[in-house]
Amino acid sequence: MPRIAMIVWNECRNDARVLKQAQTLQSAGYHVTVFARHTPGVTYRNEVLPEGIRIVRSGHAPLWRSSSPAIGPATGKRSVPLRRILSRLWAHAGMLMRIALHRAEVVHAHDVNTLVTAWLAARLSGAKLVYDAHEISTSREGYDRFRPWVARIESTLMPKAQATITTTDRRAAFFARAYAITRPLVLQNRPRLTVRPNTQRIRNELGLQQPWPIILYQGGLQQGRGLERLLRVCATLPEVYCVLIGGGRLTQPLKQLSEALGLAGRVHFIPTVALADLPSYTASADIGVQPIENTCLNHFTTDSNKLFEYVIAGLPVVATNFPEIRAVVRAHAIGLLVPADRELPLHDALKQLIDDPLLRRTLAANSRKAAEHLNWEQQETKLVELYQRLLAGPMRARP
């Protein structure tokens, strides 16, 4: 079986996109190993998933967690960033060595923070390079300091990749235009199709007593997702619950805002849940919301995991009127669109669904029907075909 070495800069526990691609290629007859990060006490260094996929994890160097005189005391203002840099370089070096020794036919990089390491590993082992750009990282929330570096890395290495992949049509157009490359293959962040009846999981776990509708947001609690605005809107909507599933930098600020708005008992936070459990949580809500803000090109060109997760769970949605989101919502009549960054339209759309159970049921039925088309299984053959074309040619590393 041809060997594929995937590399991702996370623990590969809840990265649905990476795991789905690995599963698809493993099922197609390839031998997939995912090289990921190791967190002591949280992950195994080596793991074999039920499908036969191997995960090999590399940790940060213990040296950089010590107060070595060469690095400086841990309390020094300049030493902490240096230690972090050295620690990451050590982790990348470990991944590079392991991937190069793995002698895969293809090295598959997931996102820009693995691209340099993947390219070097491909060069050292004579493998072909596939790059999956999950985001437009040159215009991404929280990436301001890194944009020049990201642009240099991608402009240099994307043209050297034998194949490129991204998540939406507009992102594919951006990469093709920005770096003068062939338009990347588009694989949307669709979940696998799971048929689940509506559940009571959220109500039972949180002990919700009232029969009020549940508005659900699931995903990262990060800047630019419109979550502060969502809480302010919920404060003006009586007889509704709002549940946020996920974690991130805004977790505590959002909890504090919820308390300040007097939303105790109506707004609830559930930490990140395992991928296998998430669909049952989603299916126990009544409305899925995606109030993402227009803070960067990456947001403007997204459709996101959560939109498709709501569809698979059969939820009506209220989502920001961005082009890729609009294309899905309008084509399948699954919800209401609202302008970015404005509270009143979001309030009105949510109130319309809260007050009109018949409309909710109609849109939910449309979501269940759309799920038959908007699932991973309907597009995974594109990935297999890409690999078949890629491995049909001679195995040469580009200069």
Image (spheres, helix red, strand yellow):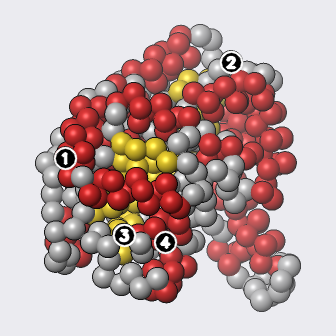
Up/down of 350 relative to 307, above or below: below
Q: Nearer the viewer, mark 2 or mark 3?
A: 3
Up/down of 164 relative to 256, above or below: above
Marked residue nearer the N-terminal end (2 or 4): 2
Q: Residue furthest top?
A: 393
Residue found 36% across the figure and 42% down from its top: 335
Q: What element carries label 3?
A: loop
| Residue type at the position of mark 2 | Thr
For label 1, the crowd category at 10 Å Cα-Cα, with few meaning under 14, some 14 to 19 and many 20 or more, is few
For label 3, the crowd category at 10 Å Cα-Cα, with few meaning under 14, some 14 to 19 and many 20 or more, is some
Marked residue nearer the N-terminal end (1 or 2): 2
Quadrant where the N terminus lies? top left
Q: Residue under circle 1? A: 358
Marked residue nearer the N-terminal end (2 or 3): 2
| Residue 237 marker | 3
Q: Nearer the viewer, mark 1 or mark 4?
A: 1
CA gap between label 4 and label 3 equals 9 Å
| Residue 182 marker | 2
